[in-house]
Image: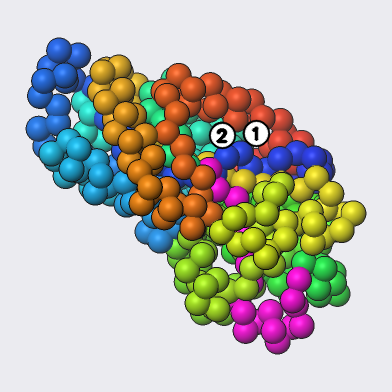
Amino acid sequence: MAPFTSLHRRHSLGALAAMALCCTVALPTAHAQGAWPTKPVRIVVPFAPGGTTDILARALVPDLSRAFGQQFIVDNRAGAGGNVGAEIVAKSPGDGYTLLMGTVGTHGINRALYAKLPYDPIKDFVPITLVAAVPNVMVMNADKAKAQGIANVQDFIRVAKANPGKLNMASSGNGTSIHLAGELFKSMTGTYMLHLPYRGSGPALMDMVAGNADVMFDNLPSSMAQIKAGKLVALAVTSSQRSGALPDVPTVEQAGGPALKGYEASSWFGLLAPAGTPSDVVNRIQQEVAKALASPAMKERLLAQGAIPGGNTPAEFARHIDNEHRKWAGVVKASGAKVD
C-alpha cells in the first residue's frame, strides 16, 4: 500500500457511523409479496465477530426474525477490508435470502482505494436503509498508557514523536475507516506508528486488551465494553462533537491543539441487498428495521454505545451512499493511498 502523504486536515474521514442489518433480495414481485420469506435469511457481515458491524447486525436479528416469522442468521465473512463479504452478496441471487451489512468502507472508501474491486458498490446493490452512524474513539491499552505516562492526546503525540515507529496502531484492516482515521491523525501530527491490520475490529481489540497493540481508532460501540471495564482508556472521540455515551471524553480536535484543528473521522453502517431485489421486499425490510430502531429499548441500547440510530428510506440511503463515494474518492486521492 502506498504511503499516506498529504491528507488535508479538514477532510472528514468519516461519514456517519452506524450499523446495518438485514437485506432481502429478489423473487418476482408478486411471489415475494405473498411467500417471502419461506426459509432463513442470511445477513453477511464482512468483518470478524465482535466489531461494530457484527454487534449491530446481531442487535437487529431478533426483531427481524419475529417480524417475518423466519430466522435471520449472521454470517461473518471477513477479509480485504470488507471486500470478501461484499463480493459474496454482490454475486448472490436477488431472492431476498442473502443480505449485507455494508459500511463506509465497503460502500464509501474501497472503490477509490482498491485498484481492482470485485464488486461495484453502486450497480451491484440495492440500498435498504442506514442502520446507524457512530464516531470512532482513540483508545489505548490502559496498562501500557499508564506505563508510558500517557493520559491524553498531547501525551500520546509527545511519546510518539520521541519514539518514531515504536508504537503500533491496530485497525480492522487496510483501508477501513478505522485505519484511515489513524492515518489522518499521523499525517496531521507528524507522528509515525507501525500499522497492524486485522480481519476486523474484534480480533484487533483482543490484541489491544492483551497488550499486543498500543493504539486504535475503533468504532465506539465495539470498544465501549472494554472502556467501561477499564481495559482500554479512551483518549478522545473522533467526531466533531463529544459523544453522549462518553461525555467526559474530548474530541481529537479539542484535545490535540492547533495541529488537529478540523480533525473528524466517523463511520456508518447500513443494510443492502443484491441488485435486482424487488422493491416490495426492500420496502418491507426497511419498514421493519426502522420500526426496530425507533423502539425505546433499541434507541437506548444504541445511544448508550455511542451509535445514532438510522432508519431512512431506500432512496435516502442511496443518495447518502452516492455522496459518500464522491467524498471518499477525493480523500483517498489526496492521501495517495492505494491497495493493489
- Picture quadrant of residue 99: top left
Give the extent of the magenta segment: 133-152
- The residue under the point 62% across, 54% down is 243
Based on the picture, tell me whether residue 14 belongs to the magenta stretch: no
Q: Tag 1: Cα neighbours inside 10 Å, few (<14), some, or many (≥20)? A: many
**Looking at numbered disc 2 in the image, what kind of residue is underneath it?**
Gly
- Residue pushed farthest bottom? 147
Q: Tag 2: Cα neighbours inside 10 Å, few (<14), some, or many (≥20)? A: many
Residue 328 bears which disc, if any? 1
- Residue pushed farthest front? 296
Q: Position of residue 277 (x, y in %)?
A: 29, 21
Q: Is residue 335 left or right of residue 261?
A: left
Location of residue 146 with respect to 97 vertically, above or below: below
Q: Position of residue 271 (x, y in %)?
A: 39, 35
Q: Position of residue 117 (x, y in %)?
A: 50, 33
- The residue under the point 62% across, 73% down is 233
- The residue under the point 46% across, 42% down is 309
Is the Cβ of the residue at disc 1 closer than 8 Å to that at disc 2? yes
Q: The residue tagged with tag 1: helix, strand or loop?
A: helix
Q: Where does label 2 land, which residue?
A: 108
For residue 208, say whether it is visible. no
